[in-house]
Image (cartoon, rainbow, N blue to C red):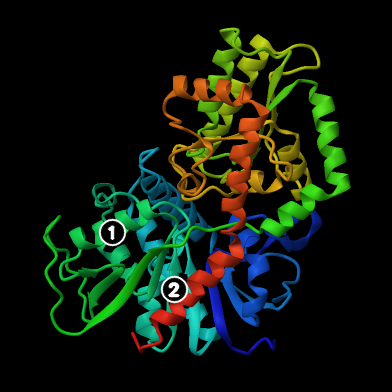
Amino acid sequence: MLPDQKSQFVIAANRLPVRWVAAQNSWQPSPGGLVSAMMTSLSDLAPLHWVGWTGVAGEVSGSFDTQHGDMSLLPVSLTHAEAELYYSGMSNATIWPLYHDGVRPPEFHRTWWNSYVAVNKRFCKAIDSVAAPGAIVWVHDYHLQLVPKMLRERRPDVRIGFFLHIPFPPADLFARLPFRQQILEGLLGADVIGLQTLRSRGNFRRTVVSLKAGIAEQDEVLLVPQEATADSPPLHSPASQAIGPTRKVIARSFPIGIDVKRFTEAAASEDVKLRAKAIRDMIGVDKVLLGVDRLDYTKGIDIRMKAFGELLTEGLLSTQDCSMVQVAEPSRSNVNQYVELREEVEQLVGKINGLHGQLGRPAIHYFHKSQPFEEIVAMYLAADVMLVTPLRDGMNLVAKEFVATRLDNTGVLVLSEFTGASELLEKAMLVNPYDIDGMKRAILAAVGTPDEAAASHMKTLRQAVMGNDVHHWVKSFVDCLEDACAHDNR
């Protein structure tokens, strides 16, 4: 594609599919969940543009290749102040904790909001510059919730989809946002709004009806008045039937999947299998528990470690027989809450290992660094029990990745009931992550699960994951968007 050529398909997300690696003075594929989930499914939609931030504030030294396979990249720049206010502030200290059930108290600052608005406008302008007439524009995630309305006002010819990768909170929680009306109106600029789960879809629809006057419902469709205003109606005012011209907005759950083929092929690789055996030999115990997470306070890493530590203290588990491996991917290291979380987790690891570890045999093997793809798959194969226990998660692809790698139907998945994945993976061992005694019972039950029962459950889990992969997710969303706009819905 020529640099100045416009696309019939445009993706907009906070980050580009590449990141700057200062140590190597080069751009490399991003390890982000959105990128890894989508890249293999986008070839059918090429040529396309991906609009996003490089992840580096201000100017970056070195050349920037605007071509990434069949995809053209359009970087959106952020100043150092915007990286602090829009990204670290509004996106990750206001919206992120609020949408995750207020696990940590969100902060509300007008300066953060003003920066959020400004950056969303910049994204909108960038999208406009590369979107061909009648193009499909797929906007992603909580960083860009204002873009759909901004783009509709600027480009009424394009078809707009929005997908929220994190949970959407209950109406009473969302109502705390001082900017709630603007965000709802921003989202309602889309033709199709995708949520991860039925729960999030229900929360969104109830929020719209309770906080926006004049919105009517018909099954999965919201009827939005064409001339919506920014005036805030009284909280929980009843929604009246829309009067005058309306526009249909579809709000539906589209649970995201993984690239199953990539994980099954890696799991079948002889090199990966040999590495998995080497990991087990090094750990030297009968049962290996595994956690793989970003280091985030929503993931419940500290709670699962405390549960494991108590089981060791009570003599219900022994480091002679059982060990935990925890990978904590570095995340948002410039945000104070994440710095504090890292210190808390590392102190907890030290305490448990100090009490229960032996020379050459720690109770917890802890890694605070990114791991190569093949190493993660080898860890999945080496584990007997996978612990995926977030306090709240939009989906959680780690659970699906683990299941996809278990080609022999071995292993047990302990899964938080507050993950989006739990709606699909009903045969996992579901647990309430707030209940530490329940967590301990689940770990004991997982360690003691008979092979035959584990195989039966894993077979069902694998069927569910393979039948709902990332290709299915992309196709179902795009098909829905095309169908929604087929009758000149704009």
- Indicate whether 228 appears above or below 359: below
Callout 1 touching callout 2 (CB < 8 Å)? no
For label 2, the residue is 161
1 vs 2, front mark: 2
Horizontal and vertical percent position of residue 75: 60, 72
Horizontal and vertical percent position of residue 150: 37, 76
- The dot on residue 179 is 1
Q: Classify residue 228 by image quadrant.
A: bottom left
Residue type of the residue flagged with mark 1:
Phe
Report whether residue 53 is seen: no
Residue type of the residue flagged with mark 2:
Gly
Horizontal and vertical percent position of residue 7: 58, 86
Q: Residues within 10 Å of mark 2 (few under 14, many from 20)?
A: many
Q: Nearer the viewer, residue 31 or 317?
A: 317
- The dot on residue 325 is none
Q: Which secondary structure, mark 2? A: strand
Question: From the image, which quarter does the N terminus lie in?
Answer: bottom right
Q: Residue at x 17, y 68 (%)?
A: 231
Q: Which secondary structure, mark 1? A: loop
* Mark 1 vs mark 2, CA separation in Å: 22 Å
Horizontal and vertical percent position of residue 236: 14, 55
Q: Classify residue 467 by image quadrant.
A: bottom right
- 200 left or right, relative to 81: left
Q: Classify residue 265 by image quadrant.
A: bottom right
- Indicate whether 475 appears above or below 459: below
Q: Residue at x 38, y 54 (%)?
A: 198
Q: Nearer the viewer, residue 482 or 358?
A: 482
Mark before the other along the chain sequence, 1 or 2: 2
Q: Residues within 10 Å of mark 1 (few under 14, many from 20)?
A: few
Report whether residue 190 is seen: yes
Q: How many marks can you see?
A: 2
